[in-house]
Image (cartoon, helix red, strand yellow):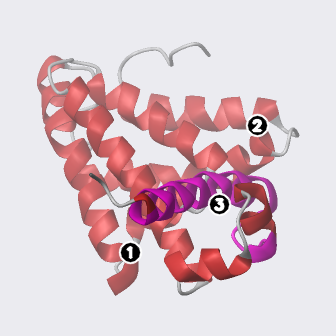
Amino acid sequence: MADPTRRDAARNRARLLVAARQVFATHGPAAPLETVAAEAGVSRTTLHRHFASREALASAVLEQNVADLESRAAALVDADSGVVTLLHHALDVQVASPSFALVALSDSPALGDLARRTAAAFEPLLARGLAAGVVHPGVTTQHLMLALPMAMSALALERHGRGSAEGTQAREIVHRGLFTTAPPGL
C-alpha cells in the first residue's frame, strides 16, 4: 500500500506548481511566496519544504513548461507544419508564463539544460518543416529560440489585457519571418 504521507506531499507539490504558474503569470515571478502558498492552500513552510527558494520554484515551473513542450513536439513529429504549431504553442505558454522566454537563450547552469531541451524539441520538427517547404530556407533552431524573447514584450501586453492587437501583430511578424504559410487564426 502506498504511503499516504508521500501521496499528500506529491499532491501539495503539484498544487504549488499550479499555483505558482497562476500567480507568476498574474503578478510576475517576484510575487510574494505567501501568495503562492495561499493559492495552493498550503502553508509557507510546506512551500519551503518542497522548494528551498524562489528560484527553485520558478525553475520547477519552467521545467514543467519545457516538459509540456517536449510532449507536444513528440506528438507533432509526423506533421509537416508541426514546427508552426509548436512555436505558436510556445508563444501561448509565454503569455501565461513570461519567464519562459528566458529559457530559450539561456546558457546559465540553472536554465541551460532547459534551453537545450527546448531547442532539441524543435529540431526534428524544423527539419521536417524545411523539407516540406513550410519553413523559409535558412531558418535555424537558433532563429526559433530567438523568436520567443523577441515576441515577449508584445505578448506581455496581451497577457495584461492591453495591446491584444500588438500581441497579434507580434505573432504575425514572427510567423511570417519564419514560415511560408499564412499565420493560423490571425
Q: Residue 170 appears in which quarter of the rendering? A: top right
Foreground label between 2 and 3: 3
Q: Secondary structure at mark 3?
A: helix
Amino acid marked by disc 3? Ala
Which residue lies under the disc numbered 3? 20
Residue placed at 77% from the left, 57% from the top?
39
Q: Nearer the viewer, residue 37 or 95?
A: 37
Q: Between residues 112 and 55, which one lies in front from this camera angle?
A: 55
Task: Look at the image and give the residue range highlighted in magenta.
Answer: 5-34
Q: Amino acid at mark 1?
A: Leu
- Please provide percent x and percent y for residue 139: 27, 42
Say left or right for 72 vs 175.
Answer: left
* Quadrant that contains the C terminus: top right
Vertical relation: 61 (above or below) 134? below
Which quadrant of the view contains residue 173?
top right
The residue identified by callout 1 is: 111
Secondary structure beneath label 1 = helix
> Looking at the image, which residue is at 47% across and 28% down?
176
Which circle's residue, 3 or 1, is located before the other in the chain?
3
Q: Secondary structure at mark 2?
A: helix
Q: For the residue carrying disc 2, how many other residues have a C-alpha within 10 Å: few (<14), some (14-19), or many (20+)?
A: some
Residue 69 visible in the displayed image? yes
At horizontal 48% and vertical 32% (from top left) the residue drawn is 88
Circles 2 and 3: CB distance less than 8 Å? Answer: no
Q: State the image coordinates of residue 20 (x, y, percent, origin top left).
A: 65, 60
Residue 24 within the magenta-colored segment of the rendering: yes
- Which of the two labelled residues, at mark 2 and mark 3, occupies the earlier sequence position? 3
Q: Can you tell which of label 3 and label 1 is closer to the viewer?
A: 3
Distance of label 2 from label 1 (alpha carbons): 28 Å
- Residue sitting farthest toward the front: 1
The reply to whether dot 2 and dot 1 touch (C-beta < 8 Å) is: no
Disc 2 marks which residue?
Answer: 166
